Amino acid sequence: MTGLTIHELGAAYRRGETTPTQVVAAYLARIERLDARVGAYLTVTREAALRAAAAADARHRAGTPLGPLDGVPLAVKDVLCTRGVRTTCGSKILERFVPPYDATAVERLAAAGAVLLGKTNMDEFAMGSSTEHSAFRPTKNPWDLARVPGGSSGGSAAAVAGDLAAGAFGTDTGGSVRQPAAFCGVVGLKPTYGRVSRYGLVAFASSLDQIGPLGQDVRDAALLLGAVAGHDPRDATSVDAPVPDYAAALDGGVRGLRVGVPREYFIEGMDPEVGRAVREAVETLRGLGATVEDVSLPTTDYGIAVYYVIAPAEASSNLARYDGVKYGLRVGGAKDLIEMSSRTRAAGFGAEVKRRIMLGTYALSAGYHDAYYGRAQKVRTLVRRDFARAFERVDLLVGPTTPNVAFRLGEKEDPLAMYLNDVFTVPTSLAGLPAVSVRCGFSAAGLPIGLQLIGRAFDEPTILRAAHAYERATSWLARRPSLA
Amino acid sequence: MSATVGTGWEVVIGLEVHAQLLTRSKMFCGCPAAFGAAPNSRTCPVCQGMPGVLPVVNRRAIELAIRTALAFDCRVNEACRFARKHYYYPDMPKNFQISQYEEPLAEEGVLEIDAEGASRPIGIQRLHLEEDVGKLVHEGTLETARASLVDYNRSGVPLMETVSKPDLRSPEEAAAYLKSFRAVLVYLGVCDGNMEEGSLRCDANVSLRPRGATELGTKVEIKNLNSFRNVQHALEFEVTRQRRALEAGERVAQETRLWDADRALTRSMRSKEFAHDYRYFPEPDLVPLTIARAWVEEIRAGLPELPRRRRQRFVAQHGLPPYDAEVLTQSRALADYFEAAVREFPQPKTVSNWVMSELLRVLPADDERAIQGAPITPARLGGLLALIEDGTISGKIAKDVFEKMFRTGDDARAIVAREGLTQVADEGALAAIVDQVMARNPKAIEDYKKGKTAAAKALVGQVMKATGGKANPGIVNRLLEEKLSKT
Ligand SMILES: [Zn+2]
């Protein structure tokens, strides 16, 4: 009963072949049996899930389901606030934090009838690309348990890949949905900045953070996005633009679409298997009737540098509130306030978080502000212009999601090597554009490879449509990891 | 001029005033902004700085700030932006304050102050919005407390910061600036101006330079000036301290000092080396604000007449002495009261006398609500003055009637009728009383004849006493004069 896509589940519910309670119970059983090995979840909300499933049962029985997500078991990254359910952000400092409010996205999922199975593991405060920086435990890649699932939404990607949830939500700041989606061979979408409310998303870098779905296929990702997208008066940066029916926009194919292939996305040092798979995918799109064009995004090289000034700068500010005064961890025995906060932060934050707080504090300091933060903002504008120029000629951009497939746990100890994993995802985040990662092949070692499709602002329908056409023209989804 | 000036030094002062805006809800959340409630009862995840929550701008706060900016003739910028100002202190739940930095709401205004009888324009550099912080409550004193508690009720209350240019030249001018500033805000209805409760707070930058110098001296910032007196006293202390240092050949250190009102001195809080690095950057959770011109014009059209203009008009239109005009324009409610009373009884100086000597004896001039709710309405005051005018009662009786009106809320005519206070103006009756009084006081008559005119006043007093104060003083005076001249 696990392993069906969301749209298949919906059909099965409608036909009365199964019920939300049966499906949710099956997922809970599978989590109990397998998650000790995968480590996708930090918290499993068993009782609440069964209660929500029973309510969904009743609606389906009455023939009045709330929509395509009614009774669908989902996992949510532990960076989204859930009322009454602890929200740790993968950090010791919030280990016992129980929010008195739901994130808007969580609220909307509940309103759509979705059943929350639990909260998924992540790199602490979403800082990382492997989920090894979780304060609690690493998550393993269901395709090879010796490998990382990517990050920071590694728990959500692993949950979907390992059939530990029908679908999931993560957050993407510089690639944190797309990169784990690529590593775990699932579909991961980062929506346009402002498309999904950030209310209740514990901020890492406010100008970049965006909530995004992870699904087994493109249609699932479209359904999940549709449930959370839209303006929210509680988030001033959420955009008041109509939400299209993403699932309905999937059909139509790619004939006549102009696809741009950025030449800077095929770099020296990248895994040749990745390059080959992506080029084959481009040919598949061409074969489906798209026109393919070579384009240039000259600022690609600066993306990582700009990102590692702006994101830590915002993080140093966003994380200032964890001082032991109001909630979360407090290390006692201090003689004064400063000592209390210092001890709390020293004990509560992991090395990567401390590194980024220091980087960001430095970048904003008097005397360095203009050279780092100021200059980074200017280059960010140039990155945006690069994309704008490319989108004058093409309808979407296609390239690799990551330069390599999932690496081994502990393999990338050098922070910079880890940061470079995001070289193809970061520029899109800086420009606020939507991008989706879909499976486009496997390495010789049997690890999935991700194809990234990047669109114009608020043009999720076009990239989803192209991804859907590609998915239907290939048979990569037939292969599944053998967890049990 | 105070003792601190008139030396070879010129005093240069600039003020930063923080005013809590009279909005119903807080700057970035829906919690009530009102003062005084059980600790932390007026808070929510946003003003408690919980993880994941986001600010939403209170449009009313922007409107009140624009209204103030227009009253000071500031340029209201077409776009402005919020920024984060960072420092660690537990009364600030996010450990940063949402404020404005490079792109404030308004700039380049002016506030006219009256200093030593003359009017002087003081430049306003900028006006911006920010959020207030909470309050720390210590068990005992800060030094001895075993624990401190935080109350976030005030956290997120809209705060408007107005920075003057360094145009003030004495502690008196600084106090005058603050007084005018407060009056404008209260007039506009944007702030209640209560300095004791902290609705209005003031910091000062002060430096000295040799007279004639154009460069500014080293400035010292003084915090915690929470009354007009404190502003003046702290600045006087600080000017003297700096002058002595400079005259002794020492240098003034750039630092922040705290005014200690109990010990009447300023003490060093932190030196320049330990100055905060606020690490400002634009608030990414809020989009830049575009201020529509039409909105600004709409707000401008709704501006009330400001105290200064009204004071000038009271002199010009009502013929009041400048002193009266100043007293009567201390609050909008009082000025409104005066003008309403003048409409009832069109003798402005008489109305002014009664308002100043009687009404303000029982009600504080700057208490808007008390004046608005005065038991004697402007119409009833007019009615009372009309009774004096037509001779129904004497001015002396009228003061008693005023008190009774204030106590009971009754109309003057009703009180006069009920208590039989109508003036005795019957010449025959009064002549008889005058005769009796003269017969009983031969000594006074003799004194009068010797040229002691004061004796006549004593006789008038006797007549008034005999009539219970009700005798018409004009008639009594005339009768006595006639009879005395015949004796
Ligand atoms: Zn609040």
Image (cartoon, rainbow, N blue to C red):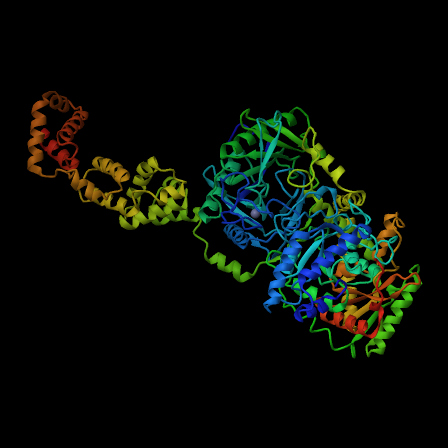
**From where the camera sits, is residue A194 visible?**
no
Q: Quadrant of residue B400?
A: top left
Which residue is rendered at x = 71% and y = 67% of the image? A9
Vertical placement of residue A428 versus B395, above or below: below
| In this rendering, position of residue B237 left or right of residue A352 | left
Q: Residue A2, image x and y in percent?
A: 75, 62
Q: Residue A228, image x and y in percent?
A: 66, 62
Quarter holding the C terminus of chain B is top left
Vertical placement of residue A478 versus A136, above or below: below
**From where the camera sits, is residue A146 visible?**
yes
Q: Quadrant of residue B93?
A: top right
| In this rendering, position of residue A138 left or right of residue B454 | right
**Along the viewing direction, whichever of A350 and A459 lies nearer the viewer:** A350
Vertical placement of residue B3 versus A36, above or below: above
**Along the viewing direction, whichever of A343 and B126 lies nearer the viewer:** A343
Q: Residue furthest top?
A: B443
Q: Residue B453, image x and y in percent?
A: 18, 26
Q: Residue A30, image x and y in percent?
A: 76, 56
Which residue is rendered at x = 9% and y = 21% of the image? B442
**Along the viewing direction, whichever of B472 and B11 lies nearer the viewer:** B472
Q: Quadrant of residue B445?
A: top left
Tally of marks: 0
Which residue is rendered at x = 61% and y = 60% of the image? A55
